[in-house]
Amino acid sequence: MFDRVDRSKRANLMTSYDAINSRMGRDTVRLAVQGFDRKWKMKQERLSPCYTTRMTELLEVKL
């Protein structure tokens, strides 16, 4: 009664999804909730310091 999901539309989508993955290879098309495997990782040591978020960490320049 309160279900607003279009079941036939979703079934057609999943059929297409499965057909593409069977033809092109596993995990060619994935849902966003499945995530993805990154081959790279962010290097934490290259992050910029938080100079503008804390007054105590502001740069002080003396001439």
Image (cartoon, rainbow, N blue to C red):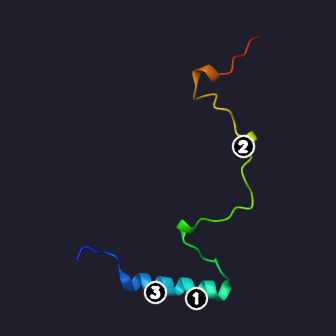
**Residue at the spot 63% in from the left edge and 87% down from the top edge:** 22
Position of residue 38 measured from the top left corner of the image (x, y, whole percent): 70, 61
Which residue of the protein is positioned furthest toward the top in this rendering?
A: 63
Q: Secondary structure at mark 3?
A: helix
- For the residues marked 2 and 1, what is the alpha-carbon distance in whole angstroms? 40 Å
Among the two numbered marks 2 and 1 on one chain, the one whose residue lies closer to the N terminus: 1
Q: Count the labels in the image.
A: 3
Instruction: Provide the residue designation for mark 1.
Output: 19
Q: Secondary structure at mark 2?
A: helix
User: How crowded is the residue under tag 1: few (<14 C-alpha within 10 Å), some, or many (20+)?
Assistant: few
**Residue at the spot 46% in from the left edge and 86% down from the top edge:** 12
Instruction: Provide the residue designation for mark 2.
Output: 44
| Type of amino acid under label 2 | Gln
| Type of amino acid under label 3 | Asn
- Of the 4 image quadrants, the one containing the C terminus is top right
- Of the 4 image quadrants, the one containing the N terminus is bottom left
Above/below status of 2 relative to 43: below
**Residue at the spot 38% in from the left edge and 86% down from the top edge:** 8
Which numbered disc, 2 or 1, marks the residue closer to the eye? Answer: 2
Instruction: Provide the residue designation for mark 3.
Output: 12
Mark 2 touching mark 3, by CB under 8 A? no
**Residue at the spot 42% in from the left edge and 81% down from the top edge:** 10
Above/below status of 41 relative to 45: below
Quarter of the image where one finds residue 46: top right
User: How crowded is the residue under tag 3: few (<14 C-alpha within 10 Å), some, or many (20+)?
Assistant: few
Among the two numbered marks 3 and 1 on one chain, the one whose residue lies closer to the N terminus: 3
Position of residue 6 measured from the top left corner of the image (x, y, whole percent): 35, 80
User: How crowded is the residue under tag 2: few (<14 C-alpha within 10 Å), some, or many (20+)?
Assistant: few
Q: Secondary structure at mark 1?
A: helix
- For the residues marked 3 and 1, what is the alpha-carbon distance in whole angstroms? 11 Å
